[in-house]
Amino acid sequence: MFFQGTLNEQLHIQSDEFRYSCDIRRGERAYSCELCNKAFSKKSTLITHQCIHTGEHPYACDVCKKSFSQQSHLIRHQHTHTGEHHYTCDMSKKAFSEQSSLITHQRIHMGERPYVCGVCNKAFNCRKSLIRHQRTHTGERPYKCVVCNKAFSQQGYLITHQRTHTGERPYNCDVCNKAFSQQGYLITHQRTHTGERPYKCDVCNKAFSQQGYLITHQRTHTGECPYKCDVCNKAFSQQGCLTRHQRTHTGERPYKCDVCNKAFSRKGYLINHQRTHTGERPYKCDVCNKAFSQQSNMITHQRTHTGERPYKCDVCNKAFTQQRYLLTHHCIHTGDRPNVCGVCNKAFSHRSNLIRHKRIHTGERTYSCNVFNKAFSRQSNMITLQPTHPGEHP
C-alpha cells in the first residue's frame, strides 16, 4: 500500500511537471493578478509581482537594512557593500556588478536605442525605461499606496510618497544634520553650504542653485508670462505670483495669527505681523544699530545715512527716498487728488491732509497740551500754543 501511494504521488508530480513545461512552451500564463489583470506563467512570479501593489519588501539587507520586493534586487544591492564589480566597460572603465547593466551602459557609447515606443516612436536604451514611458500614454499607475490608495506610475514615486505617511527622512546633510525625504532635496540643500550654482543663464550669466529658479529668471528676458488669471486675464511669470493674485478676487486669507486671529493673504505678511506681538526686530542698521521688524523699513532707514534717493520724478527730476513719496509728489504735476472725503467729497493730493480734514467731521482732537489740558486736531496748533506756557519764552 505504501509503495502504491508513493508511486501515485510520483506520477502526479511528473504529470504536474509535464503540464507546467507544456504551459511554458505554449506561452500560457495561468496566474493572473486580480488587481491589474497581468498574467504570469509561474505562481512565484505572480507573488513577486503582487509586492508592487502591496508595497511589501520581504528581502532585507543585513548590512544597511534596506529592503526589496525581489531577492534578485537584494543580491544586486549587496554588491554595493562588497564592492564586487566583475564587468568593466572598456571605453569608460566604469565597472558593474551585472553583465546586463554593462550591456545597457555600453549603449550610451554606441548610441543604440533598441526599445521603441509603438505610439510616439520615442526610443530608449533599456526596456525598463520604455515600460515607464509607455505609462504616459496608457495612464497606468500600477504602484498603489496601501494607506491612502494614491497610485503612481513608478515605484520610486510610491516609495517617496510613503514617507509622507511614515515621516521617514533617510537623507541627512553631513554639515548641519538636517534630514530630507528625497535625495534631490538633500542635493539642493547642500548647495546652501557649498555655494554651488550650477544653473547659469545664457543671456546675463546669472547663476542659480536650482533649475526652477533659472527657468523663472529666464522669463525676465523673454517676457514670458505663462500663468494667467481666469478672472481678469492678468498674466504672471510664476505660479506662486498667480496664486497670490487670485486671492485679491477670492478674498482668501489662509495665513492666520494664532494670537489675535488676524488673517493674511501672504505668509510674509503674517510673519511681519507676528513681530508686533513678539517685539522681534531682526533687521539692524549697521551704522547706528537701530533695529526694525521688517527688512524694507531698515533699507528705507539706511538711506538717511547714505543720502540715496532712488525714486526720481520724470517731470522735474526731484528725487525721493521712498516710492510712496514720489507717487504723492506726482499729484503736483498731474493735479490728481486721489484721497476723497467720504462725508463731503472734498479731495486731497496727500492722504495725511485727508486724515486731518476728517477730524473736522469727527471732532477728534488727537494732540493734548499737558499744561492747559487743551486738545487740538493738529499738532502744529499745539506747538504754536506751547511758548505761552508760564516760564516759557519764544
Image (tube, rainbow, N blue to C red):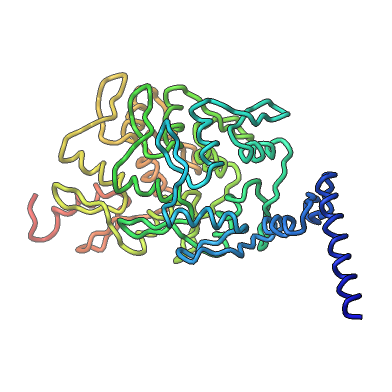
x 23%, y 44%: residue: 301
| Picture quadrant where residue 200 is located | top left
Q: Nearer the viewer, residue 222 or 243?
A: 222
x 17%, y 35%: residue: 307
Q: Position of residue 315 (x, y in %)?
A: 31, 19
Q: Is residue 269 left or right of residue 56?
A: left
Q: Position of residue 318 (x, y in %)?
A: 25, 25
Q: Residue furthest front?
A: 3
Q: How many marks?
A: 0
| Picture quadrant where residue 276 is located | bottom left
Q: Position of residue 36 (x, y in %)?
A: 78, 51
| Picture quadrant where residue 300 is located | top left
Quarter occupied by the N terminus? bottom right
Does 332 appear above or below 281? above
x 42%, y 30%: residue: 91
Q: Is residue 373 left or right of residue 54?
A: left
Q: Nearer the viewer, residue 140 or 219?
A: 140
Q: Residue furthest bottom?
A: 1
